[in-house]
Image: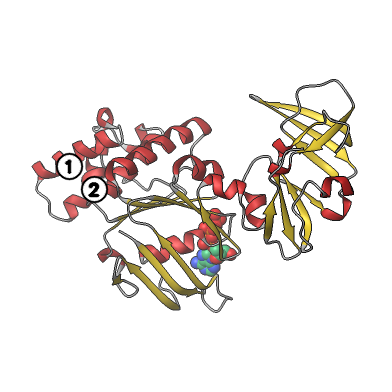
Amino acid sequence: MRVTLKNITLAYDQQPPILTNFDCQIPDGQLTALLGPSGSGKSTLLNLIAGLLTPNAGQIIFDQTDVTATDSRHRNIGMVFQDYALYPHLTVRDNIGFPLKMAHVKKAARYQRVAELAELVQVTDQLSKFPQELSGGQQQRVAIARALAKQPNLLLLDEPLSSLDATLREELRGVIRQIQRTTGVTTVLVTHDQEDALQVADQIMVLANGRLQQVGSGGDLYQHPTNLTVAQFIGRPRINVVPLGLLPAEFKSLLPTTTQATTLGIRSEAIRLATADRHRLTATVIQQIQLGRDVQTHLQTALGPLVSTAIPTTTATTLAITLAPTGCTLFAADGHSLVGGDRDA
Ligand SMILES: Nc1ncnc2c1ncn2[C@@H]1O[C@H](COP(=O)(O)OP(=O)(O)OP(=O)(O)O)[C@@H](O)[C@H]1O
């Protein structure tokens, strides 16, 4: 099911609006991640889609049907929150089957469906247990199965991975991806963690300051950020940002000519050891940090502090570095991105 938000304005009580004239479209049958910093309005948006909040203005449309005034219970949505919210006195079997019981589905049919869902989320061997006997990741699987029990047209996941440790988080990302692929249910995942979004989503919507900053694949957002906000939010380590005025003239010749540019964004992998006589910049090595496979090198330069992930481990205290234009993006004073470089130094 396709979800369209048209011209939505939402304010809490008498406060300034969180969303103003907000438009977006969530494509049918895909997994869309709503990614943004804390307070950017992600949960607000999800609650509007779920019908838990009513907009002050605008329309919410499911396929061709305007559901703005439709009660949440009649929107055929499955929802999962950060805190599993399972019923502690019910077994896993009865938790998953609870929505079906409420819908007066007969026991045999109910247990059949529970068995299918348990298999889908891989908790078949846990059906007789109570929630407190499960790990956080298992509880979240049960919550997802319960949300899918009534075959919703839309699955809304609000930070479902936030309470999990790194290993379980990684595991559940895979489960969510696989469930969505298997069922084909249109899914919206709210997260503030780009790793979640990058690993799980078909498309990512970046929300910041109540605005949809950019919609695209992880690759699009990383390589072609629409503005500095997206460029700084996507990618670890953060993109290096330097005033263009500090860049030596010979480097400027490597970049596209534009008079509007005021700021240069340089991805960490674009800061490399210089091998040629030209396009060299002296850098003092502040520290090198081994992060698994990668080495992060913190440098001090005439451009200011820079972080590189393309410099091998070294004992040198001073290096000659260069910039690969492919990892550089120019930004205008208002933050919008201009063209990126396309030639290597
Ligand atoms: N019930 C409420 N009453 C008043 N203001 C609220 C309410 N809920 C959220 N807000 C405000 O709306 C803004 C957006 O909140 P929202 O929870 O949608 O953001 P978020 O991106 O989901 O953040 P987080 O990742 O921290 O959950 C915040 O400034 C928040 O303080």
Residue at 59%, 76% in the rendered image: 16
Q: Is residue 40 rendered to the left or right of residue 267?
A: left
Residue at 25%, 30% in the rendered image: 124
Decide which of 229, 98 is in the foreground and name it: 229
Circles 1 and 2, Cβ within 8 Å, touching? The answer is yes
User: For residue 113, which numbered disc appears in the image?
Assistant: 1
Number of on-image labels: 2
Decide which of 280, 53 is in the foreground and name it: 280
Q: Is residue 326 above or below residue 155?
A: above
How far across and how far down the image is residue 310, in percent? 72, 30
Q: Is mark 2 within 8 Å of ligand 1?
A: no
Label 1 vs 2, first from the N-terminus:
1
Q: Is residue 98 rendered to the left or right of residue 278?
A: left
Q: Which residue is mark 2?
A: 149
Local crowd at mark 1 within 10 Å, few (<14), some, or many (≥20)? some
Quarter of the image with the C terminus is top right
Callout 1 amino acid: Arg
* Rendered-image quarter of ligand 1: bottom right
Q: CA distance from mark 1 to mark 2?
A: 7 Å
Callout 2 amino acid: Ala
